[in-house]
Image: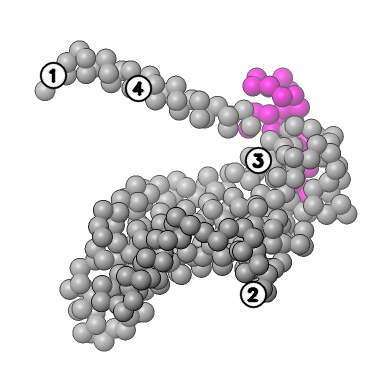
Amino acid sequence: MKESIGSRVFDGFNAIFLTIFSLCTFLPFVYVVINSFSTSTTIIPTSFSLEAYEYILSSVTFLRSVKVSIGLTVIGTLFQLIMTSLMAYSLSHKYLPGRSLVLLMVLFTMLFSGGMIPTYFVVKDTGLMNTFAALIIPSAISAFNLIILKNFFQSIPDELKESARIDGSHELGLLFKIVLPLSLPALATFGLFYAVGIWNQYFNAILYLTDTAKYPVQVILRQVIILTSGSIGDTTEIESVTYYGNSIKMAVIVIATVPIMIVYPFLQKHFAKGVLLGSVKG
């Protein structure tokens, strides 16, 4: 079928517009990378230096914060996926007593929340202050992810579940041996959501952690960007960052961004499919 002139013009305009838009979103990252290797702040590097990266990678505090963030991301993502899957699987049973009330409470949290101060007192009174659990447990289940995953579980044929029950499988065995393996696209997608959220959080760490040795990398990144002088974290471990100026800020941004960017390509093939699955069924 031959396209009309108007259709070709429209496609050409879309291609040009999307190309320009893509460049606009990509150029800031290019700017950060270039300036992390340059001693001057410019889009075109006038000099090349690895001093900022050498300084950062030799920093005990920064490397420790990266390890903390990696550990938090891995453990927190697994914990949040397990908690979300358990609750979603329970709510996927249409004849569960009180199911409608629980779903209403979940939907209510998507519109309203207690706020920062009540959440802080809950964390404090439960003894989670200055623990890594304070960065994981309060946000263990996302209401949006829960609803989508529940709908996806409901789309799995009941006959498959019944056959497993006839063979003697209990509910947990049915969940972990049949339902979850069939839900890998959705789990990969929501796992990426949870991982990015945990990796990027810094405010909760500032709010709940008092030991600087437990700070994740985003808190260190915040200190580097905001403070034009002084030290990063523990003053006994890192000297002033003033000497390196803008390049060290850019280098920290690159190092703090690259790990989560490396994970995304491995989950990209599941991303679109996982979001759409279960999103149109009640």
Depth check: give the residue in front, 93 or 122: 122
Q: Where's residue 119, x and y in %?
A: 61, 63
Identify the residue position indicated by label 4 in the image.
Answer: 15
CA gap, disc 2 and disc 3: 34 Å
User: From this viewpoint, is residue 40 visible?
Assistant: yes
Badge 3 marks a residue whose secondary structure is helix
Q: Which mark is residue 253?
A: 3
Dot placed on the residue nearer the N-terminal end, 3 or 4:
4
Dot placed on the residue nearer the N-terminal end, 2 or 3:
2
Badge 1 marks a residue whose secondary structure is loop
Q: Which mark is residue 2?
A: 1
Res 247 quadrant in image: top right
CA gap, disc 3 and disc 4: 31 Å
Asked if residue 230 lies in the magenta stretch, the reply is no
Q: Amino acid at mark 1?
A: Lys
In what quadrant of the picture does the C terminus appear?
bottom left
Dot placed on the residue nearer the N-terminal end, 1 or 4:
1
